[in-house]
Image (tube, rainbow, N blue to C red):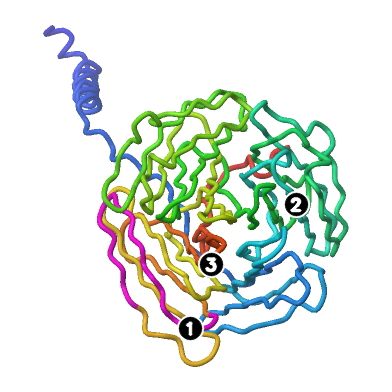
Amino acid sequence: MKTFVENRFGLPALVVVALAALYGVAYVTRPAPPAAAAPQPRKVAVESVTAVCPGAKGERVSVYLPGTLTDEPMRDAKPYVTKGPGGLEAGYLTRVTQGAGRGLAGVRCTEPAPVTWLVGPGPADADVRLHLTNADKAPALADVQVYAAEGPVSGDKGIGLEIAPGEHREIDLKTIAPSADIMAVSVTTAFGRLAVAARTTLETGGVDWLPSAAPPATRVVVPGLPGGGGRRELLVAAPGENDAQVRIKAVSEDAEYAMKGRETLDVPAGSVASLDVTTGVGGSSAALVLTSPTPIVAGLVITGTGGRSDVAFTAGTPALDLGSTVARNGPGSKLVLTAVGGPGKVRVQVIPEKGRPDEPFEVSIPAGRTKNVKLKPKGDYALAVTPVAGEVYGARVIEDALKSGLLLTTQPLAPSRLWTLLPPLTDTPNVVAP
């Protein structure tokens, strides 16, 4: 050791060894770095909107821009296309009290999209007319796939549909999937975008438009089940390659619970399954919360009461994080709002076609409950719903009681076109990699 220390290189070597040991101890015992926060979507303003309604000659379309509501006639049966700044909404209602088309039907003018999902009765039990409109200046190539209880049933009949710029095509789904009694439909474009709508008339009576359903997800909330009598039928599709075991909870006016005997629903891969939840919700206004390890799409068929029953449809929809607007409402309208998880609160404003907008009012929804909000304005009006707190879902319901039977229609509160969420972006060479 003495020799080592007296060596001119010995002492520096000892110092280096000691420093290395200290560094090693410090490295091993260092505190873990804080986890980087997961990137979140950014809320950005929408600058322009294109909205498309299927044509209905002689009907009036309500067009809403923030703070104003106008009324525009459809002079022919061609699709109605309107363009404007962010926040634009449009839609119309039809009311027929006699004949095969008897019913109250409401439609929201949809924006062109690359993918659209619809869930409802199939062509075996209903007249289902699919409307595809290309409002863009570029052509679109679409695939229409129909899923039924027995699996995919449309084959190649709906594949490779060419829709020229400005073209509208109406398709009787009996020509694509005549055997389906319940269905989920996906309209996917290989290139271009299409505005999609579907009008459904049941053989047993009743007519309405199918609302767009939220895309496949492992958690789906179906809002807007109105209270009262009539059948409530849940439809769930598992469009992927794996079976889905769906857990179901009802959120009613009085409680949040698993419905006895209806706690789960098994859906084979690539098919649609139905579940009668009429007694499960017991005549209460409600929403259904569905969870599954496999992505699912869901909708619900609402049948009215009386000698001649009408029908309405609702579907899985996002929470009111971005707010929502319904352009066309009328007598008998109400909101059916549900708070999932904690308590919720929204701000509601009525915008009449004539006169100044009403003062907004706030609605509080207890945690795990559904609440009805009756609306009393006269004439046509728009309805703007803005989130204040909590996770809230909802729908606008219109009921018109006639001696022959109840007329009704339901429109889920779709995200407002005033805002959108952009996914997080990261710097990566994969963007330009072949």
The question of residue 229 being in magenta is answered with no
| Depth check, front residue: 301 or 191 | 301
First in sequence: mark 1 vs mark 3: 1
Mark 2 and 3 residues: CB-CB less than 8 Å, in contact? no
Q: Nearer the viewer, mark 2 or mark 3?
A: 3
**Vertical side of 160 occupied by 110: above or below:** below
Q: In the drawing, does residue 170 fall left or right of residue 269? A: right
What are the residue bounds of the magenta stretch? Answer: 361-380
What element does badge 2 sit on? strand
Identify residue for label 3: 402
Q: Quadrant of residue 280?
A: top left
**Vertical side of 202 occupied by 412: above or below:** below
Q: Which mark is residue 378?
A: 1
Q: Residues within 10 Å of mark 2 (few under 14, many from 20)?
A: many
Task: Pinpoint residue 232: horizontal percent, then vertical percent.
Answer: 49, 45
Task: Pinpoint residue 174: horizontal percent, then vertical percent.
Answer: 80, 42
Identify residue for label 2: 130
Q: Nearer the viewer, mark 1 or mark 2?
A: 1
Query: Of all residues shown, which one is farthest toward the bottom?
Result: 355
Q: Quadrant of residue 211?
A: bottom right
The residue under the point 58% across, 54% down is: 311
Give the CA separation, mark 1 to mark 2. 33 Å
Q: Amino acid at mark 2?
A: Leu
What element does badge 1 sit on? loop
First in sequence: mark 2 vs mark 3: 2
Task: Pinpoint residue 110: horizontal percent, then vertical percent.
Answer: 65, 62
The residue under the point 53% across, 65% down is: 403
**Vertical side of 150 occupied by 418: above or below:** below
The residue under the point 81% across, 69% down is: 77
Q: Nearer the viewer, mark 1 or mark 3?
A: 3
Q: Amino acid at mark 1?
A: Lys
